[in-house]
Image (cartoon, helix red, strand yellow):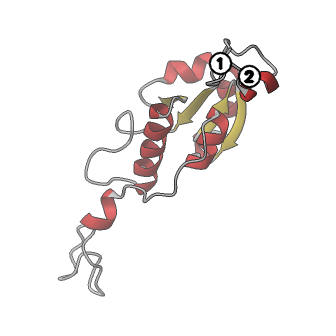
Amino acid sequence: MHVDMLGWPDALDTVSHRPADTEAPMTSIQIFEPGLCCGTGICGVDVDQQLVTVSADIDWATSAGGSVRRFNLAQEPLAFAENETMRSFLHTVGQEGLPVTMVDGATVLTGRYPSRPELAKWAGLGAPAAEDRPSLLSAAQPAASADGCCGGGGESCC
C-alpha cells in the first residue's frame, strides 16, 4: 500500500479493485504477417512505408512496456501452424487476409496493421503523444516526371 507524506493511504490504492501490491497480467499482442523478406520487411531497396510505420509503432509499444510479438509467414510458418485460429483463418481466407492482430488469443484486426493508438489501447498503455512518424521513403524518393517515375529517358528506376 502506498501512503502520502502524512501517512494516509494513497487515493489510488483505496479505489482499486485489486490489492495495491499485485499487478494485472500483461496483455499479449500477436501480429501474424504475410511472408516478408526479413523479420520486419524493412530491407532491400523497395521499402514499404506501412512496414516502417508499424515497426516504429511496435518499438514504441514495447519500449513503453507492452508485449507485442510479430510472426512472419515466410520465416515462422510453425507459429501459424500451431495456432488453431491462424490455421483456420489461412484455410478460409488465405494469405490475402493478412496481417492478423490477436490480443490474448482473440482476433481484433485483419487485413491491415494496427495503428499506434490501437496498440496503446490493447496493451493498456497511455495514449501515444502526437509525433511525426518515421519515413524512410519521403526523403529518399526522387521527384516523378512525365517521362517516367524517376525522371527521364523512358527508363524506370522504380
Residue under label 2? 13
Residue 82 vs residue 1, the one in the foreground: 1
Residue 156 vs residue 72, the one in the foreground: 72
As helix, strand or loop, the secondary structure at mark 2 comes to helix
19 horizontally vs 71: left or right: right
Q: Position of residue 148 (x, y in %)?
A: 28, 80
Q: Position of residue 11 (x, y in %)?
A: 74, 28
Label 2 amino acid? Asp
| The quarter of the displayed image where residue 19 is located | top right
Circle number at residue 158: none
Residue 83 vs residue 68, the one in the foreground: 68
Q: Position of residue 8 (x, y in %)?
A: 72, 21
**Residue situated furthest left in the rendering:** 153
**Residue situated furthest bottom in the rendering:** 146
| The quarter of the displayed image where residue 63 is located | top left
Which image quarter is the N terminus in? top right
- Of mark 1 and mark 2, the one earlier in the sequence is 1
Residue under label 1? 2
Q: Residue at x 32, y 61 (%)?
A: 137
Is residue 63 visible in the rendered structure shown here? yes
| The quarter of the displayed image where residue 155 is located | bottom left
As helix, strand or loop, the secondary structure at mark 1 comes to loop
Q: Residue at x 36, y 58 (%)?
A: 135
Contact between marks 1 and 2 (CB within 8 A): the answer is yes
Which image quarter is the C terminus in? bottom left
Label 1 amino acid? His
Is residue 90 visible in the rendered structure shown here? no
